Image (tube, rainbow, N blue to C red):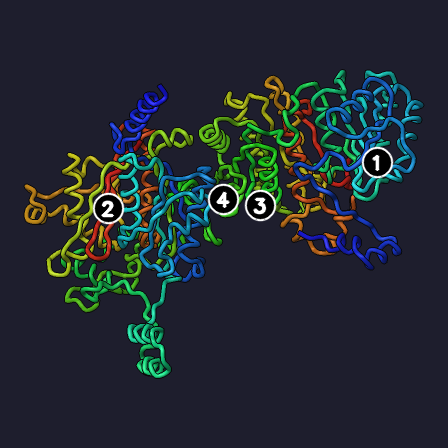
């Protein structure tokens, strides 16, 4: 009798815990928190990646009352990372108010890191592997790792392996004065040696993007971000940190005239006149962001209002080394594939978030989508892919104004636009969609569709 | 926020010198720790009649205190409860008061004297009113005579409120306990038999959801800690710019942080929506957020006047209005608002602040009746000199003088204010309505 009961029970259990749920749960954005972004060398000059990500995570925990909570999984990353931070996210969780039994992993996909943590954790939620998650990213250029030169590194390793005095002296003798200069991290592409700005300058020239158009994008970014701050939009998205309570790069008082006065900084050696300045390029920035994700049941249990559904995502990459496409053009290809798979066109989106690595990145992407030639020859479409209504583009500003702590940008965009989606749906009572696009080093790009929950 | 003088007069050689010079001798006050016994020694219950018998039974049977009805000479009493509810002529004060007087010299350090009496009204016979009002003067003077961190406070029962009414019992426990360490020379009136006794005195706020404004630091932070310690789920509210400190408080008390400017038009709705969505209810609102912009009135700028009134009183009125009309603030709700001794006695350079804090006193008095139908209350706590970041900025000499200007000869701690707030927010305090409880160590100014 006892045996048969136990058999019945075990059958039941195995059916109930089957890995793939019968109907896939929705992956929901439930909220977010970031610290204000600061210009490199500013208020976070002495904060580490771990410090900043912990602050962002603790702020999220406080906002949503998650103290001691065992979250399904936390994933985050940093682009510029000390080797000692090999387990950065787990260390952050251990230092946070979350349960120490919350698992975590690090992830790195250049500037797409933040968005990729959202995408991969959402996939786990949709598979039923986890019910809740925190996605995040952090970067500091102020507290960047400094490595020793290759010569010094090899000599030091030899020295550590040396056993006899003779071997030790021989190893030490290999060190040359020039080896003592530290190797600072660079954002240049390993395969071309060109900085990201120089790469974008090539693409900017290729697509004939004007200085005026770029300055207009930068101006709009500052205007819109300033308006959002003034309206208190970020009251439940940002927690101050180390005396920084607003994004440090924001210049609410900038004007097209001021932007026009700045000297070009990239593309100075090209045949075409240089157009990219410090004003229409993102500055080096320190900051961290987090996004709270979960399924409907978990949201309900915790009294949290779902803001947006993570619908789908598509990564892309371009052969910028040998091909004709610019380093940051991958989203121009990824978005058409993503929209085709979902049966949508650009016109179906109420919001389009294109990360402003440079104003020209946004403009070259839009230009490619508007080009008949690009549409036919590169995308294999009947004509141009489509046009983005500028009133729907980066409505609360983007990286040009907020700054761009590489891995933290994805979380900033997702949390901001999710709040906006929810508010718009509440106001209009119809489905509302957003397209998110982030370009990244290595010719990478990551794009995603969010829909108001 | 240390008090160097207090430390000096309580240790070694400097203590002797201070005594010989006749300098003030403030005693370190004992603060509440969960799990500690209510009193550190026996209590003397003075008085005859059913009320005195009831109090003696409550102390000995329910609260496990060793109770004496007649003083044992030389015995160190931790508390004296003077039950004077029956007096109908000033002549009748003599016997119980002098009986209590006999043990005052041997009262423990941090001892407690609590009077229980009835409210004197114009409807009373003159002799009855004289006897009852006499208790007021007696208590306030006695409190000024006590030393060693001992305090004297009174409970005044209005109308036909019984001596075993929840709020009388609650107030008695509060005044006897270390929770009232910095409350001295105060008479708290209990207006009705409303309120309920908690299942446990250790966690009287269990299951209640409380919002504390200005919770990022100072007194607000301490209120958040104290309400959470007493069992409440806390929503910690402060300006978005104070978010970093607010996060720390919310995570420590395992509540939620709500970054919000209380002067926003929709502050009340946002507070209520947050509390209902996250915690399912809202029971307690502590209006602690406040600012000072001191200037002599002759030099007052519109900005300084208006901003103080906007934050300290207008915001509270607007939030209360939103809560009261919502229909979701009806389960024995509690509003506790921070007033100030400046609002009672006035303070040079603080016309704007005192106007706002006087306003708070008027507001709770007029708001309490609106809540009475749901078993709700509105009350105020008026702190005196409290050791905070704000008072640490007062010039050193002025600060030293300000500290000594009360019967306990020291500044209070933020937790002292928080304890009074927690008491007024508790279910037992349902019969205390529209009152102001001062936490000032019996400051020399005002009532």
Could you tell me residue A152's position as x and y percent? 32, 75
Q: Residue at x 27, y 47 (%)?
A: A116
Q: CA distance from mark 4 to mark 3?
A: 11 Å
Task: Identify the residue under disc 3.
Answer: B217
For mark 2, name the chain: A
Could you tell me residue A365's position as x and y percent? 18, 50
Quarter that holds the N terminus of chain A: top left
Q: CA distance from mark 3 to mark 2?
A: 40 Å
Is B108 rendered above or below residue A406? above
Task: Identify the residue under disc 4.
Answer: B247
Q: Nearer the viewer, mark 4 or mark 1?
A: 1
Q: CA distance from mark 4 to mark 2?
A: 31 Å
Residue A437, label in figure = 2
Asked whether the beta carbons under mark 1 and mark 2 sit within 8 Å of each other, the answer is no
Could you tell me residue B280's position as x and y percent? 48, 26
A293 or B130, which is in the foreground? A293
Task: Identify the residue under disc 1.
Answer: B77
First in sequence: mark 1 vs mark 3 = 1
Res B340 quadrant in image: top right
């Amino acid at each position: 009798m006892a045996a048969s009961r136990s058999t019945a029970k075990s059958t039941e259990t195995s059916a109930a815990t089957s890995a793939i749920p019968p109907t896939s749960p929705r992956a929901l954005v439930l909220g977010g928190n970031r610290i204000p972004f600061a210009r490199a060398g500013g208020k976070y000059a002495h904060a580490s990646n771990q410090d900043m990500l912990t602050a962002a995570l603790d702020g999220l925990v406080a906002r949503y009352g998650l103290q001691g909570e065992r979250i399904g999984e936390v994933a985050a990353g940093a682009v510029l990372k000390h080797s000692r931070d090999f387990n950065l996210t787990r260390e952050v969780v251990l230092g946070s108010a979350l349960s120490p039994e919350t698992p975590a992993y690090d992830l790195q996909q250049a500037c797409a890191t933040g968005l990729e943590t959202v995408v991969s954790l959402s996939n786990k939620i949709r598979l039923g592997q986890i019910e809740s998650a925190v996605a995040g990213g952090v970067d500091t250029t102020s507290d960047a790792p400094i490595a020793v030169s290759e010569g010094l590194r090899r000599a030091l390793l030899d020295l550590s392996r040396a056993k006899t005095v003779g071997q030790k002296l021989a190893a030490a003798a290999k060190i040359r004065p020039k080896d003592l200069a530290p190797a600072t991290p660079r954002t240049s592409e390993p395969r071309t040696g060109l900085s990201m700005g120089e790469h974008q300058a090539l693409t900017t020239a290729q697509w004939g993007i004007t200085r005026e158009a770029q300055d207009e994008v930068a101006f709009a970014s500052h205007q819109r971000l300033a308006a959002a701050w003034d309206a208190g939009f970020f009251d439940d998205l940002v927690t101050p940190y180390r005396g920084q309570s607003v994004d440090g790069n924001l210049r609410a008082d900038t004007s097209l005239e001021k932007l026009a006065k700045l000297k070009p900084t990239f593309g100075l050696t090209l045949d075409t006149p240089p157009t990219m300045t410090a004003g229409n390029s993102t500055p080096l920035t320190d900051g961290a962001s987090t996004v709270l994700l979960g399924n409907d049941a978990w949201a309900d249990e915790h009294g949290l209002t779902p803001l947006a559904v993570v619908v789908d995502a598509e990564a892309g990459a371009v052969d910028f080394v040998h091909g004709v496409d610019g380093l940051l053009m991958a989203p121009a290809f990824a978005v058409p594939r993503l929209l085709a798979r979902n049966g949508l066109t650009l016109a179906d989106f109420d919001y389009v978030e294109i990360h402003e690595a440079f104003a020209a990145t946004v403009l070259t992407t839009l230009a490619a989508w508007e080009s008949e030639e690009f549409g036919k020859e590169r995308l294999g479409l009947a004509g141009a892919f489509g046009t983005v209504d500028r009133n729907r583009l980066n409505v609360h500003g983007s990286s040009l104004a907020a700054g761009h702590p590489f891995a933290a940008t994805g979380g900033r965009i997702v949390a901001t636009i999710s709040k906006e989606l929810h508010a718009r749906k509440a106001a209009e009572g119809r489905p509302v969609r957003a397209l998110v696009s982030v370009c990244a080093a290595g010719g990478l790009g990551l794009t995603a569709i969010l829909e108001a929950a | 926020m240390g008090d160097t003088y207090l430390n000096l007069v309580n240790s070694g050689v400097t203590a002797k010198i201070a005594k010989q010079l006749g300098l003030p001798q403030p005693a370190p006050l004992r603060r509440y720790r969960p799990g500690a016994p209510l009193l550190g020694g026996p209590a003397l219950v003075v008085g005859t009649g059913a009320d005195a018998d009831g109090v003696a039974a409550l102390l000995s049977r329910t609260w496990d205190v060793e109770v004496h009805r007649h003083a044992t000479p030389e015995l160190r009493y931790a508390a004296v409860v003077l039950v004077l509810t029956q007096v109908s002529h000033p002549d009748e004060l003599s016997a119980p008061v002098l009986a209590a007087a006999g043990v005052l010299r041997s009262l423990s350090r941090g001892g407690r004297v609590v009077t229980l009496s009835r409210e004197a009204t114009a409807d009373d016979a003159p002799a009855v009113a004289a006897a009852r009002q006499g208790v007021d003067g007696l208590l306030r003077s006695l409190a000024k005579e006590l030393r060693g961190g001992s305090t004297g406070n009174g409970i005044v029962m209005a109308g036909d409120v019984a001596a075993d009414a929840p709020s009388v019992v609650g107030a008695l426990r509060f005044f006897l306990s270390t929770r009232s360490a910095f409350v001295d020379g105060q008479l708290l009136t209990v207006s009705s038999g409303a309120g309920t006794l908690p299942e446990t005195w250790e966690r009287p706020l269990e299951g209640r959801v409380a919002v504390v404004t200005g919770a990022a630091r100072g007194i607000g932070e301490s209120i958040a800690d104290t309400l959470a310690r007493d069992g409440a789920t806390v929503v910690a509210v402060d300006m978005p710019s104070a978010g970093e400190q607010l996060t720390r408080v919310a995570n420590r008390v395992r509540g939620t942080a709500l970054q919000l400017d209380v002067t926003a038009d929709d502050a009340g709705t946002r507070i209520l929506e947050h509390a209902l969505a996250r915690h399912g209810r809202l029971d307690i609102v502590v209006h602690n957020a406040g600012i000072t912009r001191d200037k002599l009135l002759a030099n007052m700028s519109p900005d300084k006047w208006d901003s103080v009134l906007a934050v300290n009183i207008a915001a509270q009125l607007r939030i209360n209005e939103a809560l009261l009309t919502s229909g979701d603030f009806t389960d024995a709700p509690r509003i506790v608002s921070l007033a100030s001794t400046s609002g009672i006695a006035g303070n040079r350079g603080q016309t704007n602040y005192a106007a706002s804090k006087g306003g708070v006193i008027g507001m709770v008095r007029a708001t309490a009746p609106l809540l009475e139908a749901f078993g709700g209350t509105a009350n105020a706590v008026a702190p005196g000199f409290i050791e905070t970041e704000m008072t640490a900025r007062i010039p050193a000499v002025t600060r030293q003088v300000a500290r000594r200007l009360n019967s306990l000869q020291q500044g209070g701690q933020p937790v002292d204010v928080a304890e009074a707030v927690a008491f007024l927010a508790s279910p037992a305090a349902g019969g205390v309505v529209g009152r102001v409880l001062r936490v000032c160590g019996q400051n020399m100014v005002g009532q």
